[in-house]
Amino acid sequence: MAKKSVASLQTGTKKLTKAIRMEKSPKTGAYVFVESVMAGDQVNEFLKGK
């Protein structure tokens, strides 16, 4: 289950994107949020990954 929350960040000439994905923790069974800042073309791969 992934929560898609994407915000665009622009620094100089690079356009970066912050993506947040929700994952279920294997230890506790609780949901945790994984955040990452990356280039815009990598967001779909990040959201699909587990």
Image (cartoon, rainbow, N blue to C red):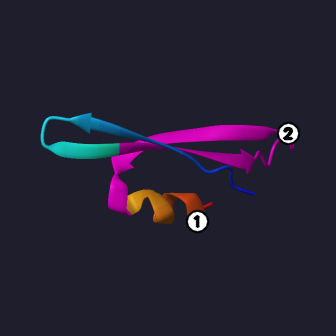
Residue 36 magenta-drawn? yes
Q: Quadrant of residue 25?
A: top right
> In the rendered image, which quarter contains the C terminus?
bottom right
Q: In the rendered view, does 18 fall on the left or right side of 1?
A: left
Where residue 37 appears, as percent x and y from the top left, is 39, 41
Mark 1 nearby-residue class (10 Å; few <14, some 14–19, many ≥20): few
Residue at 49 percent across and 64 percent down: it is 44
Mark 2 nearby-residue class (10 Å; few <14, some 14–19, many ≥20): few
Residue at 39 percent across and 60 percent down: it is 42
Q: Start and end of the magenta stretch?
A: 17-41
Q: In the rendered view, does 41 fall on the left or right side of 43?
A: left
Residue at 25 percent across and 46 percent down: it is 15
Q: Of circles 1 and 2, which is in front?
A: 1
Q: How far apart are the alpha carbons under marks 1 and 2? A: 22 Å
Residue linked to disc 2: 28
Q: Nearer the viewer, residue 27 or 34?
A: 34
> In the rendered image, which quarter contains the N terminus?
bottom right
User: Could you tell me which secondary element the residue under label 2 belongs to?
Assistant: loop
Identify residue type, mark 2.
Thr
Q: Nearer the viewer, residue 46 or 6?
A: 6
Where residue 5 appears, as percent x and y from the top left, is 58, 44
Residue linked to disc 1: 48
